[in-house]
Image (spheres, rainbow, N blue to C red):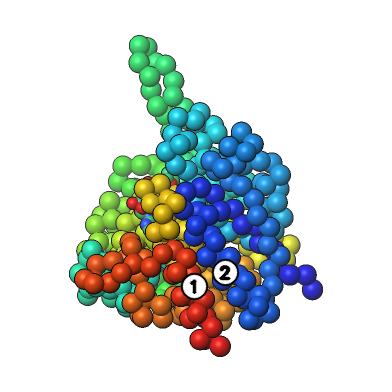
Amino acid sequence: MTNPSLLILPGDGIGPEVMAEVRKIIDWYGDKRGLVFDVSEGLVGGCSYDAHGTPLTDETMEKAQSVDAVLLGAVGGPKYDDLDFSVKPERGLLRLRKEMDLYANLRPAQCFDALADFSSLKKDVVAGLDIMIVRELTSGIYFGEPRGIFEEGNERVGINTQRYTESEIERVARSAFELARKRNNKVCSMEKANVMESGILWRAVVSEVHEKEYPDVELSHMYADAGAMQLCRWPKQFDVIVTDNLFGDLLSDAAAMLTGSLGMLPSASLGAPMANGRPKALYEPVHGSAPDIAGQGKANPIACILSFAMALRYSFDMGAEADRLEAAVEKVLADGVRTADLLGEEGVTPVSTSEMGDAIVAALDSSL
Ligand code: NAD
Ligand code: IPM
Ligand code: MN
């Protein structure tokens, strides 16, 4: 049997720093569990632009299409702010999502007990929180046409288009209902059906899929603005939230703060099953390249490490090993190990990115 294949794209800013810690975890699984991955590395984002004049080469795109899973750090940074829109670092990531057709973006927000005091919300609001945001990732206003900046009369007009087809809504709704069945059996769908036609269609199609295929799952609907409010007021009312590309982007950053830090939130972007029955998949932290702390060894690698745990679970059927890695992260946090973004308690000295990775490897060792 051949080893499972992984393409690693560290990207820009803190991307390579947090990915170096994931490499330690991957090596640990090879050495200690006999789970050897066939790992290759490539460029995406600003570093690819610097090397090749494009944020993603066709060769890297083809490689991404051929592996079992892609693991990405982060892209972007102020150095690239003035680049033409077509070659901005973020275009590389969006091309990967679109061409791999990764329509279901799973963004779990879990509050580890050790961090419940640290959230900017009250402890009882977040303690024990475990919700899953399913963000549609390959359509909506991110990709709709027409788009662009045009001259109109004597001024410029910027245009983006929110567009959803019935089948695009159906497939992401199915992903959300399937996940709910394995969790607490509840889905809340968020849109703005009060002001957007695409929202009216979204609500209707989610309801139809529910009625025909998932009547056993509890479904509710919320306007996305009210949903944002409810996410801060009492997030534990939710189990799975399904929403569009742009609302999902905003709601998941907000959900990050329920867990304590943006440096904690992993994600899985899944597409249709490949020939081997596993979904096309890319795993990445929800956070970006964090230019304000890049190069200083301050970044929290947990979001990226937990993204690898999601890869173990969703691409490699290694749920027990994913549990092991998540438990190792939980143990390290319970032991009081903190990167700077998780500091709040008096008298705690932060560890570096690399020390956090080492602590998680040590916790993995102690799990054997
Ligand atoms: P960001 O997520 O990079 O940073 C927001 C804040 O969170 C910063 O203060 C940062 O220091 C902090 N932060 C983020 N991740 C952290 C971590 N792991 N540990 C500790 N602190 C962390 O968002 P931004 O500043 O709005 O964007 C910076 C660049 O990243 C932009 O170019 C943006 O387009 C890009 N971006 C990329 C992705 C991605 O690659 N998936 C996601 C979001 C933003
Ligand atoms: C995210 C990011 C991306 C998005 C950017 C970098 C393209 O914010 O993954 O959440 O807007 O989807
Ligand atoms: Mn985002």
- Viewer can see residue 202: no
Identify the image quadrant of the N terminus: bottom right
Q: For the view shown, which residue lies furthest in the top direction?
A: 154
Residue 6 lies, in percent from the top left, at 66, 62
Residue 72: x and y in percent read 55, 55
The residue wearing badge 1 is: 358
Q: Secondary structure at mark 1?
A: helix
Confirm or deny contact between disc 1 and disc 2 (CB under 8 A): yes
- Which amino acid is tagged 2? Lys
* Structural crowding at the residue carrying mark 1, measured as other residues with C-alpha within 10 Å and reported as few (<14), some (14–19) or many (≥20): some
Rounded to the nearest angstrom, the CA distance separating label 1 from label 2 is 8 Å
- Per the image, the residue denoted by label 2 is 24
What residue appears at the point 58 percent right and 46 percent down from the top-left corner? 44
Q: Is residue 232 above or below residue 64?
A: below
Query: Along the horizontal axis of the image, is 310 left or right of 135?
Result: right
Q: Position of residue 284 (x, y in %)?
A: 51, 58
- Left or right? Give the position of 129 relative to 317: left
Q: Position of residue 162 (x, y in %)?
A: 43, 39
